[in-house]
Amino acid sequence: MNASVSRKMLRTMEPYHGMIYFVPEAADAYQRVGLTGRRMGYFASRAAAMGPVPADVVIATFFNFFPALVRRAIPAAWEHAHPQPVLDARRNAADAALRRMLGAMVDGAEMKEASELAREAANGCIPEGRPLYAGHASLSWPDEPHLVLWHAQTLLREFRGDGHIAVMVAEGITGVEALVIHEATGDIAPGILQSSRAWPDAEWQAAKERVRARGWLAGDGTLTAAGRASRDAVEARTDELALVCWERLGEDACTRLRELVRPFSRAIVEQGFPFANVWDED
């Protein structure tokens, strides 16, 4: 199986998981359990599977956020709500949001088939060296097919993300440098990654200079040929490390899973969620 399959699976399936970071149901659910503000809800809800971890663990596993931003939310979040109510709120929010956005598709035969295939793929992942994945893998599986699919995609994307971080660490790329490199591809509008991860101008510019010193950044802020080759190598190695999950299914079943999930992801994307740099219908 070609390693690029793992990237294709991500690009088709990610909206199904990623909507949880944008839907109003999530913000409301986190507020009800005592979390204050969007940032606290995000960091706590994604980290809660690892337990009431300190800020340093979140900084390490989330990788590319300005550390002071994380420290403003963690560990204060655990003083407002213990991890289990946060996890319950997140799953309940996913349930409500998916039912709202997908309507009758939630109860269809295609959803059940997709959930079974995705769960089989997720069962092929391994925990060694994958801390964020391992935390989520320790959670119980839901019963409803649309939530089984959501949980499976959560596991698959966190597994891939842990591997992606490992590759970048091996290449000596820091979190902020990874953002600079991503922006330099032109795949995302300038300023979005810096602002969304709250990197101050001084740290952002210093990271750009370090990337430029490697010969990866051109004068106009785009990637040089060497920079593009380095990024492509990181992405290719990430694909390879994520392939173990999809090999469990085989190519035909992977193709079938993409066919099944595509209408669900399309329905989510069409409601205005910012997945343009991830979503792929091909």
Image: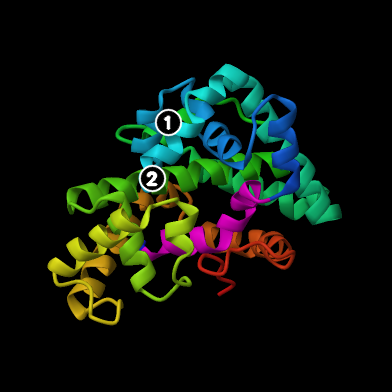
Please give left or right for residue 165 compared with residue 100 in the image.
left
| Residue 261, image quadrant | bottom right
Which of 201/100 is in front? 201
User: Looking at the figure, which quarter contains the C terminus?
Assistant: bottom right
Secondary element at tag 1? helix
Crowd class of label 1 (few under 14; some 14 to 19; many from 20; radius 10 Å): many
Label ID, residue 172:
none
- Residue 275 horizontal/vertical position (percent): 58, 64
Is residue 100 in view?
A: yes
Which of 191/164 is in front? 191
Q: Say whether marks 1 and 2 touch (CB < 8 Å).
A: no
Numbered marks: total: 2
- Residue 25 horizontal/vertical position (percent): 75, 42
* Residues at marks 1 and 2, CA–CA distance in whole angstroms: 24 Å
Which residue in the structure is indicated by mark 2?
66
Foreground mark, 1 or 2? 2
Secondary element at tag 2? loop
Which residue in the structure is indicated by mark 1?
134
- Does 217 appear above or below 15? below
Decide whether residue 119 is among the magenta residues: no
Q: Magenta span covers which residues? A: 4-22
Which of 177/236 is in front? 177
Secondary structure mostly seen in the magenta stretch: helix
Q: Amino acid at mark 2?
A: Phe
| Residue 202, image quadrant | bottom left
Residue beneath the point at 73% across and 55% down? 110
Most extreme residue toward the right is: 104
Is residue 81 in view?
A: no
